[in-house]
Amino acid sequence: MADWNPALYTRFEEERTRPAAELLARVPLEKPRLIYDLGCGPGNSTALIAARFPDAEVIGLDTSPAMLESARQRLPGLAFAQADAATWSPERAPDLIYANAVLQWLPDHPVLLPRLFGLLAPGGVLAVQMPDNLAEPSHRLMRETASAGSWAGAIGDPALAGRLGRMLEPAGYYDVLAPLAAALDVWRTAYHHRMADAEAIVDWVSATGLRPFLDPLDPEQRAGFLAAYAAAIEAGYPARADGRRLLAFPRVFIVARRAP
């Protein structure tokens, strides 16, 4: 995929950072020494971590050069590096691996999450938050729009572009990690974000879930796809009593701790 757009991503930074803060609040550590923020993006989650654990060494990792540059500008006193969570392995075992809204992009979770958990120091914590919204209108309409226009051939299989089948049910994550963890908490929360209009919903997903659908398209195809998708979103998210739209956004949270 093309590189990420930090400015577009941070347009809804308050809403995106709320689940990151709620995940961090459930981390049962007092004085971790080494923390990695996987998929740190523009540094909004890394800033939360550094504020809670000011004495820890905090390192942000991301695959996107643009996101890393944005994070370095925001937090010049912290270290950031380019790395892929699918293959990353630290030189020293960390006390906290924090992965906010990143692992949903990667396949094979029954292997991936135990691998990351196994990288922790004794007593360490794996804290994960992942969007679980593929059944919501925002993402269902992506797949429907992708299969219904002249752009369909360029996009290919909408299920692959839409990452269908990658995530487990919350109970599945419990089953994967329970045999390994001394303590494990898994929960699912649905946020309902107040959006100005349908265009705002399109802007939101354009920075994340819509990217695999848009990246293969030429400018004419992209314009056509976006117009069709925006019309579908307009119908799929009717105006509420105040004229605004509510974007339902379910997310799965996992906090797993290794034995000391």
Image: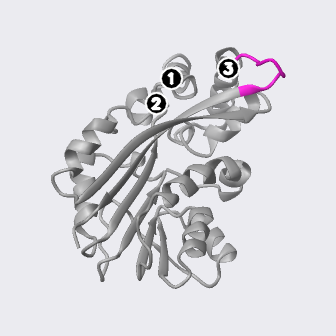
- Span highlighted in magenta in the image: 238-245
- The numbered disc on residue 140 is 1
Q: Where residue 190 appears, x then y in whole percent?
A: 53, 34
Few, some or many C-alpha atoms within 10 Å of disc 1 (few <14, some 14-19, many ≥20)? some
Q: Earlier in the sequence, mark 3 or mark 1?
A: 1
Q: Tell me the residue that label 2 is attached to.
A: 134
Question: Quarter-wise, where is residue 84 in the image?
Answer: bottom left
Verify CB contact (< 8 Å) between mark 1 and mark 2: yes
Q: Tell me the residue that label 3 is attached to.
A: 237
Few, some or many C-alpha atoms within 10 Å of disc 3 (few <14, some 14-19, many ≥20)? some
Question: Quarter-wise, where is residue 20 in the image?
Answer: bottom right
| Residue 240 among magenta residues | yes
Residue sitting nearer the eye, 91 or 64:
91
Q: Where residue 127 appears, x then y in whole percent?
A: 40, 58
Q: Element under label 3?
A: loop
Q: Could you tell me how far apart the alpha carbons at marks 3 and 1 are, in whole angstroms?
A: 12 Å
The amino acid type of the residue labelled 2 equals Leu
Q: Is residue 191 left or right of residue 88?
A: right
Identify the residue at image location x=72%, y=16%.
Answer: 238
Residue sitting nearer the eye, 140 or 35:
35
